[in-house]
Image (cartoon, helix red, strand yellow):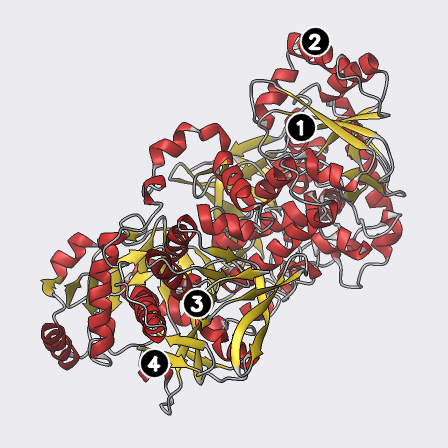
Amino acid sequence: MSIIEYDVIVIGAGVAGLTAGTLLAEKGLKVALVTSGEPTACLSTGCIDFCSGKDNPEEAIAGLPAHHPFHLVTSKQINDAADDFRRKMARAGLSYWGDTSRSRLVLSAIGTFKTTCLVQETMQASPQNEQEKIHIVTFAGLKDFYPGYIIARLKNASFSTFDAGISTTMGIASLFEDESFLETFLLWLEKQNIREDKIAVPAVLGLESAAAIKNKIEQHMERPVFEIPTIPPSMPGRRLFNCMKDCFRRAGGVIYWDWQATGAEKSGRVIEAVFTESQGRPNSLNAKAFVLAAGSFVGGGLRADHHGISENIFDLPVLTAGKRREWFDQDYFSLNHRISRAGIVVDESFRAVESPWDNLYICGAILAHVEALKNGCGHGFALATARAAAESLLETRR
Amino acid sequence: MIKTDVIIIGGGATGCGIARDLALRGIPHCLIEKGDYAAGATGACHGLLHSGGRYVISDPISARECYDENMILRRIGEKCVENTGGLFVRLPGDSKIFRERFLRSCDEIGIPTEVISSTRALELVPALNPEIEEAIRVPDCSIDPFRLCMLNMKTSQLKGGLSFTRHRVIDIMRSHGRCTGVKVMDTGTGEQQEIFGNVIVNATGAWANAVAKLAGSEVPLTLSKGSLVITNHRLTDMVINRLRPASDGDIIVPNEAVCLAGTTSLAVEDPDKISIEPIEVDTIIGEAGRMIPHFNRTRIIRAFSGVRPLLKSQKLDSREISRGFQIIDHQNGMYSIVGGKLSTFRLMAEKMVDTIMNAFNLKKECETAYQPLDGQEELSGYPLSKRLADMKNIVCECELVTRRDVEKIIEQTRTRHVGDISHRTRLGMGPCQGGFCTFRALGIMHDMEILSPEQSLGALRDFLQRRFRGIRHALWGDQLREEQLVEYIYLGILALGHTIEHH
């Protein structure tokens, strides 16, 4: 059994957990983060969606239903969250573009446009309409990228195929980190006689120096280059996770990797410790306060079985979205599946309503009523609620 | 205009079996199917090639037919039949009197049985409930209904038979009271054409009455819905039956990498309007879980229903209605063949073609019981080593389907339907239920320039909508997590949802 006592234990290494953890560590608290493994953020496009329903994310947030947890965050907190995130990522070498007063579009791998807010520099030149003239460069054997989907929808697009000798996104991304590979690629690209205004590539332009690689191709080809996000494994998602993880560590945070939180020790109105399991060995971590940012179902924060939905670390009350037969709408595309409302209901202090724990704060996708896909409340929602939860925690400590 | 001798409507096991039988007897024929082969009850069953045990008390004649056909099919179709063997297990509380009747009836009919101890049964199937009293071994097999239909059609195609899938019969033409042909419509393009023939065989299963009506005839049917679930693991290598009178959830069948369990039985009116109730899923899992306890914890990857076309009877519980088949001569040049079951499809085809031969005074014996199914050389069971050799190009990781496999089917059929590829390769039939590989299969169609821009996302959307219908009743636990990830990929990363608002 561990006897180290932390000020705060954060559960979950996604955007919410790392944001809250970093903010608290920066304030001089001794913070540890436990995670069962890589977060779902690694699978994401790396784009930061706040609320993508309208042209203006801030207005879209204001228009969300009354019980939506975004209303528990002030607009100052939202703006601070975005600014702070951009500043920190830029310092870590991953520049983000955009601001919360304007939505922007990113071309998807099937030729549709995804609405988002902040994008990595490599997606900054993504077309904003179907008329733009683009040339897509794909890589031989890439299983999850088919330019035909895009060509079918964008009338002014064409494509060519480069054989990198490797056919996984991760493999190609690591090749791009090597200068001689980049030079071979540029020589080949030159010969393609590209006439279009922009050059598109699936998101494989390196892991660490994506923006620099993109800039080199742009300079060489004298036109904008942009990445198209791929389905997982996603390099932009991994870049985001790596940089956020570095920020947290630089702020003094400790990560317990591959530590699955399994339960908690409770006493009176406080949580004393979380129980964890790592390689079959039980352990426990003590702290004065806890932040639950374990995500929704995919992340593992919520669990559904055929009787109902539960949260299994602290056994918090879960808004369960009706009986099992009511979880899903008949229409797959309606985005009105009740299960996407399931989660933990919190008050303005980001503590669970109807639960007695004074030192447990909850943020991110595990919150009830988020409806992430319907409302486009993605990483931006995680950033904002994590900030608000961290501030609430600091406030209470004082 | 097409002219042929026999027009077969319906591409289930019966229709495909009739096409093969006609081909072997040298009779020109043309098969019309509104979807793909095995799209109705054939493809929506558990793929059990009955030993006959299941019907031995309620319907001894059917039981004997099953046993004989079982022996024939394992001989002629070794590449679509897996000789798993089967067990009837008796749980604590199950009637001993039924056990005695079961053994006696099997003996009278000639179905070989072997009573084995629970210890021996657990050696054969380690996942069995250790509390079973005993088990009776029977010669059950598992059969791949999709492959079975394809192989039957192969013979038809080799002998010059015609076939049109995704063509719907919209009218049956008549002259002087006799049927002279059918008007069909391509369901993709809407194009119509006429096909003339001397005889029409209506082998449309649950849709038999609707088709007969086009010729002014009737087929009295009782429709019975049977629901099934699929697990993501092969929990047993043998077919497991419950030793009791037929009831819900008493059969578990291994099929390639998965298991199917079912069924339920509920009367329905319209075969095109069926849905699954959560209670059916719970019942099947609960009952199957009594035979193999792991069922309660395993991932259910899909729940689906088929409609059994049973001969009309006054009996209220449709399970009591004979599973025997019947040939109806409508006296206007059209025959309907109804009832029966997958296990006896070949016998049904034989009797149907015999009837036609008699009517036209033609003499040629049926050969379908002796000739091995054509096209089996190309299949070799589950050639894992062969597929792994092309590992880099695997597009369906669950079922190890390579890009080349997919390209071959597209070249052969020029299909724009992912379902057609699934039926022929098992693409998308594993745990992710096509969540990842469908995007790839359609991408390959794009590469091969088969899809028009309009079809591009439409095909993806249709597939996801259909897929959802099958999986939405079995979503909890890890299966739900995987499904939410798939949803995030299509609606989040690929923004497939937003295009709908624009349309």
Residue at 37 percent of width and 51 percent of height: B155
Cα separation between marks 1 and 3? 49 Å
Q: Is residue B459 left or right of residue B329?
A: right
> Badges 4 and 2: C-beta atoms under 8 Å apart?
no
The C terminus of chain A is located in which quarter? top right
Residue indicated by mark 1: A239
- Type of residue at label 1? Arg
The answer to whether one can see residue B302 in this image is yes
Residue at 51 percent of width and 46 percent of height: A273
Are the residues flagged by discs 3 and 4 from a single subunit?
A: yes
Give the foreground label among 3 and 4.
3
Give the foreground label among 1 and 4.
4
SS at mark 2? helix
Residue indicated by mark 3: B41
Q: Foreground residue, A16 or B203? A: B203
Are the residues flagged by discs 1 and 2 from a single subunit?
A: yes
Is B212 drawn above or below residue B36 in the view shown?
below
Residue at 82 percent of width and 44 percent of height: A78
Give the foreground label among 1 and 3.
3
Residue at 43 percent of width and 76 percent of height: B336
- Type of residue at label 4? Arg
Q: Position of residue B6 (x, y in %)?
A: 45, 66
Cα separation between marks 2 and 3? 58 Å
Q: Position of residue B301 (x, y in %)?
A: 46, 56
Residue indicated by mark 2: A183
Mark 2, other Cα within 10 Å: few <14 / some 14–19 / many ≥20: some
Q: Foreground residue, B222 or B401? A: B222
Q: Position of residue B413 (x, y in %)?
A: 54, 46
- Type of residue at label 2? Glu
